[in-house]
Image (tube, rainbow, N blue to C red):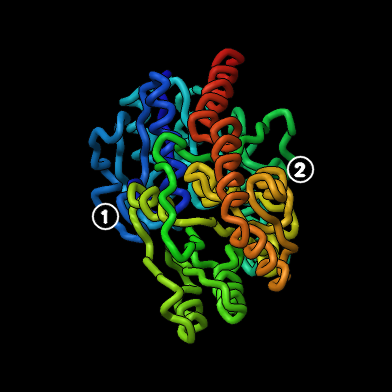
Amino acid sequence: MRILYVASGIPVPGTLGGSTHAFEVACGLARRKHQVHLLAARSTGQFELASLVRPVSQPHAGFLLHWQQLPRGLALLGAPLILRLARAIQPDVIMERYYNFAGGGLIAAQQLGIPALLEVNALIVDPPAVVKRRLDDALGSPLRRWAEAQCHAATQIVTPLHTTVPPSVPRHKITELTWGADVDRFLPPKPVSPPQVVFLGSFRHWHGVLDVVRAGLLLLEQGVAVQFVLVGDGPERAHAEQLAAAQAHAFHFTGAIPYEAVPTVLQQASVGIAPFTTATHPALRAAGFFWSPLKVFEYMAASLPVVTTDLHPLNTIIREGQEGALFREGDLPDLVAALRRVLNDVQRSRQMGRQARERVVAHYSWQQHCAQLEAVLERILASG
């Protein structure tokens, strides 16, 4: 197949989860012998006037990468260029990573009369508790109408959880498909002493980074010899560093790191932690935990036992005592207890890490994701 994959505003290469997702999907489909063109951003938030005329294009990791440098909120301004690019490429299918202010790939597919696949990774229509939703309602719901129009325009939709897609969209158009990890990228474990607990990801409230620090402080007060490595950046980083200051020797903040550096960091760890919380995230509370937990899959690929929240579907990926330990959402003492269960028995911990690796290879790799995605694409091409 010849595939045009539109990921408006997502930097590739980049340090965001969305960057990893777009890169791995493009790479994985290219490895499966498809001709892949990925339209993405070079960096976040910047505007280059030339992006309205032509992208900067170059071969990258087996696919052709086209950079269009527009702020995400102005992504639809790039629709004419996407249409010109599609006419030049003549793709069999267009894939687009959903964003409320995007949709240029779907427009191009309609203009060319070819199938379109929409990737949805977040709740499409925000619940009323979200300020953006209330503003949209006050203006007559233009964002909601455009979001639903994108869903209806797509031939097929892939999403980690079907509840992200509005009820008005026929369920037969939806395929549930989780993210994954590049299981060939990660290295055999070489844990250091004292043991390291690693947090990888965005420093935003629903990732629970402050609870990582709070749990770490309690463990240290209890006399547990442990270090914490926190990889990433975001609005809660300053608060996390302030909390950790009393035991600064035990907390190491690396900032955001390149994707290719992640395996080396995880190789030295003993435990991966992912204490997600839905408490302050209305969309997660309304639709269920729809984030596909990239960090969890990467911990597993690195043969780490994982401590995560006892929420569906996290508790179907990590099973208590098999691939790691679970704790009750928002319960800090229970998080500490879960960490102790993993840290206190080194041999059992290593066995859980091996089981985690086996499970991600069998069920949650990018390789499997792309094979399933290929099947969806072949199906919509055959039906068209």
Q: Which residue does the numbered mark 1 point to in the structure image?
A: 48
Res 137 visible? no
Q: Write the residue at 28% across / 48% down.
A: 51
Q: Write the residue at 35% across / 26% down.
A: 87
Answer left or right for 290 relative to 2. right
Figure check: 372 above or below 278: above
Amino acid carrying mark 1 in the image? Glu
Q: Nearer the viewer, residue 206 or 243?
A: 243
Answer left or right for 180 relative to 289. left
CA gap, disc 1 to disc 2? Answer: 38 Å
Q: Write the residue at 26% across / 53% down.
A: 49
Q: Quadrant of residue 85?
A: top left
Q: Quadrant of the N terminus?
A: top left
Res 365 visible? yes
Q: Which residue does the numbered mark 2 point to in the structure image?
A: 167
Q: How many marks?
A: 2
Q: Secondary structure at mark 2?
A: loop
Amino acid carrying mark 2 in the image? Pro
Figure check: 288 above or below 214: above
Q: Nearer the viewer, residue 123 or 133?
A: 123
Q: Answer few, some or many: residues within 10 Å of disc 2's Cα (few below 14, many 20 plus, some between 14 and 19).
A: few
**How far across and down, in percent of the image, does residue 344 sit?**
62, 62
**How far across and down, in percent of the image, does residue 101 sit?**
50, 52
